[in-house]
Amino acid sequence: MASYNIFLLPGDGIGPEVTAEVEKVAKIVSDAGLAKFEFEKGLVGGSAYDAHGLAISEADMARAQAADAVLLAAVGGPKWANVPYEVRPEAGLLRLRKDLGLFANLRPAICYPALADASSLKRDIVEGLDIMIVRELTGGVYFGEPKEITNLPNGQKRAVDTQVYETYEIERIAAVAFELARKRNNKVTSSEKHNVMKSGVLWKEVVTDLHKKSYADVKLEHMLADALGMQLVRWPKQFDVIVTDNLFGDMLSDVASMLTGSLGMLPSASLGEADANGKRKAMYEPVHGSAPDIAGKGIANPIAMIGSFGMALRYSFGLIEAADLIEKAISDVLAAGLRTADIKGEAASSISTSAMGDAIANALKKAI
Ligand code: IPM
Ligand code: MG
């Protein structure tokens, strides 16, 4: 039986609570004899800062580099609002993405039929929604230099962030989007702001060229990022795969998450370049944050975190059937009416984080 080393980074806030539920689901997969998982735990974000004054230690970075996959829950919280900028909780997450070269962030937004009423949009607009946002994750304004605040002679200050993309960065993320589209509904919508940004002009040009050269069988459309935000809430089912830069992808994926009923539903995969053996560095994380307001109460929704583990099985370990079964277990539990507080909607009551994890693990156990 194959054995995989998963580096767990529970992080802050609700992170440790939702991470505990993944271990239950992983146990079902290994009890079924499909694979063995070795979990090692580390610290990232505020919890790492409290322990050693850094957003992530060098030792934990080395463990992340060595692991078959990293599973990270969430970082940040008001407790660390005033720590130095370089060691703020988010710096740990950004360093992991950058140092592991995880340029491709896959954020699927699926609206389970049972949850269509939990969305703030009308049922017919979101029911059956299945889109994939492919966000560039190691470039753009998140990492561009200069990035600074300087003092001006007149006593004012000046802040600069730099939006920068090179051809290869756009090409490789577009290729990921086209490849995914071929296995889905064969359509890619590429999004930027070429009407105001030079990086948008290049983005559009490179995506168009790559399409012509290697992916002419895939339907390609271009949409300005503001218009895409509007279309996402007007008629999201027009999309299949959306490919966009780091900042627009951050925004648009939060918008897309609410189409699915709750931010607590969205998993994500961040993948690096394939090596000679076809193996990619990878980190899996829910799109939601650390939700400090509900941390420690045992009411957080563990579905995005469990879904992220499912994505690890799919994209890192080739356990496609098990990944499908995890998605089905989630869908079955929702169809049976079980809800955490965030997706309660009209339901009479809601269940705890751990009860939701148990329910999904049990549903999986029956199916596997
Ligand atoms: C996300 C988050 C992060 C981001 C934050 C926590 C730095 O919002 O993963 O979408 O902006 O990328
Ligand atoms: Mg975000």
Image (cartoon, grey):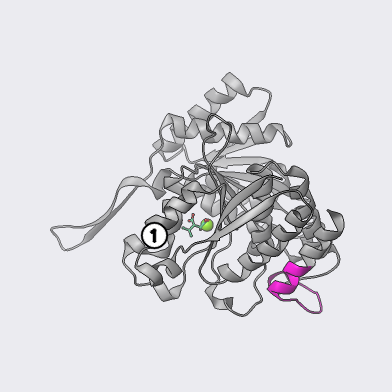
* Rendered view: 292 above or below 239: below
Nearest the camera: 214 or 278?
A: 278
- Locate the N terminus by quadrant: top right
Q: Judge whether residue 343 can be spotted in this image.
A: yes
Q: Is residue 57 left or right of residue 289?
A: left
| Magenta-drawn stretch contains 347 | yes
Q: Which residues are magenta?
A: 341-358
Q: Which amino acid, by three-letter code, is at mark 1?
A: Ser
Judging depth in this view, the residue of 21 and 195 nearest the camera is 21
Q: Residue at x 44, y 57 (%)?
A: 60
Queried whether the magenta region covers residue 361, the answer comes back as no
Report the residue at 66% width, 49% height from top: 311
Instruction: Assign a secondary structure to mark 1.
Output: loop
Considering only vertical position in the picture, is 364 above or below 271?
A: below
What number of labels is visible?
1
Residue located farthest toward the front when viewing the structure as drawn: 1
Residue 231 visible? The answer is no
Q: Position of residue 44 (x, y in %)?
A: 46, 62
Q: Position of residue 283 (x, y in %)?
A: 55, 50
Residue 164 horizontal/vertical position (percent): 38, 40
Residue pointed to by mark 1: 57
Question: Residue furthest toward the top?
Answer: 213
